[in-house]
Image (tube, rainbow, N blue to C red):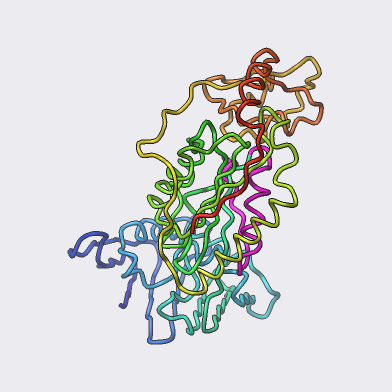
Amino acid sequence: MRFLGSVPCWARIPAHGSNKPAIVRITGFSFQMVPHQRDIRVRLALPASAASLRFLRAAVDAMEEIVAADCWPVPTYDDILFYMQQTRLILSAKGSRLCEAPFLSLGPSLNLRPSRRFARGILEVVTCFGTRTFRAFVHKGEDYPMKVFDIVFSPTGGTEKASGYIANALEGETVAVDLTDSGLGFRTVAMTKEDVAVIAVPSYGGRVPAVAAERLGMMRGNGAQAVLVCVYGNRAYEDTLVELEDAAKDAGFRVIAAVSAIAEHSIVRQHAAGRPDAQDAAQLAGFADQIQQKISAGDASEPAIPGNRPYKKAGGTGMVPKATKECTACGACAAVCPVGAIDKDDPKRVDKKACISCMRCVAVCPWGARAVNPVMLSAATKVLSKVCAERKECELFI
């Protein structure tokens, strides 16, 4: 494939799901890309303006959206974002100092790493900013190391702790993705088929939190292997794992294992208090060993995961924590609410319809000044005491 352009230039490339070529017009810069058998060389000549770089980013982003993955000759955003630490990146200003900013300012759309079809290649990028020239060399060895993406929705920390016992025991560098962070660009999170994702969520009434499923669906699994983790407060996880399985597959993941684990109940905290404990940690580490053996053996078989389809009906409005008289309006709760239900200007105000009863605000308040209705909490405690009395153990489906 060869693109040669001036101002303006046109690229004719196959589009997703069609044998007909898509025509993309790129203006404002010259673009030349010549991939060789084991070598890719890209040369860009750009005006010395941030506007031009933004234009370039928008143009290439648009082109990447309509080009079939098999025909996209340079790496995608996830490659530059998540493999940077595994490559040797050298940016040198001509006759000057090392400088990263101009290269990185090109943003995610200019993907400066050889694709897997050129795994031993060298990518050379020369970007001209007026009289200054920056040169980037990215050299990759024979193989790309596996990344372990720890994708977690954990408002109160229990799910993150359980997931960590698995993700940190797998081979590969761990990359954390926080599903509770509403400001994270989830659409920019993408994996490759060589990667592994540990996807962990709490069970809310036997279901996956809707916001967690929504944000997971924005990501691009691209065939990465997925280990599903459902964490519950010693009652039951019901249809959480099968719903998470469906959400993961819809996002492009290949499910190879699933785990149920127990953590302290986020509302009635005396149930499963202190869990995951040392016994859980040892058990989850053992699960991780079995999962790693499956990955190393190249076994991509799908596990049989318990649950029902259609899923159980989602529960209605849960318990909405409110500010007590000790509240100082510091805003700590509003800053980390996963769904933005707490007013940042007046943290004592809560959008009851938006609240998902995750209890993060209760967990993070430095003054202990947020609580649920004590009458409702007492009633929930009595109900749960009947089903949470017996210790439940972690489970592996592989």
Along the line of sight, the residue nearer the viewer: 55 or 388: 388
Question: On the picture, is 184 further left or further right than 37?
Answer: right
Q: Is residue 94 above or below residue 222?
A: below
Residue 217 lies, in percent from the top left, at 43, 46
Q: Residue at x 56, y 79 (%)?
A: 137
**What segment carries the magenta color?**
155-182
Question: Which residue is situated farthest in the top direction here?
Answer: 375
Quarter where residue 8 is shown? bottom left
Question: On the picture, is 87 further left or further right than 108?
Answer: right
Count of labels in the image: 0
Residue 35 lies, in percent from the top left, at 38, 81
Residue 339 lies, in percent from the top left, at 56, 32
Along the line of sight, the residue nearer the viewer: 293 or 351: 293
Question: Which residue is situated farthest in the front direction here?
Answer: 390
Q: Is residue 324 above or below residue 243?
A: above
Q: Residue at x 51, y 80 (%)?
A: 124
Along the line of sight, the residue nearer the viewer: 205 or 279: 279
Q: Residue at x 26, y 67 (%)?
A: 13
Question: Which residue is situated farthest in the left direction here?
Answer: 20
Q: Is residue 122 above or below residue 302?
A: below
Quarter where residue 55 is shown? bottom left
Quarter where residue 91 is shown? bottom right
Q: Is residue 61 above or below residue 349?
A: below
Q: Is residue 163 magenta?
A: yes
| Quadrant of image for the N terminus | bottom left
Q: Is residue 235 magenta?
A: no
Residue 160 lies, in percent from the top left, at 65, 47
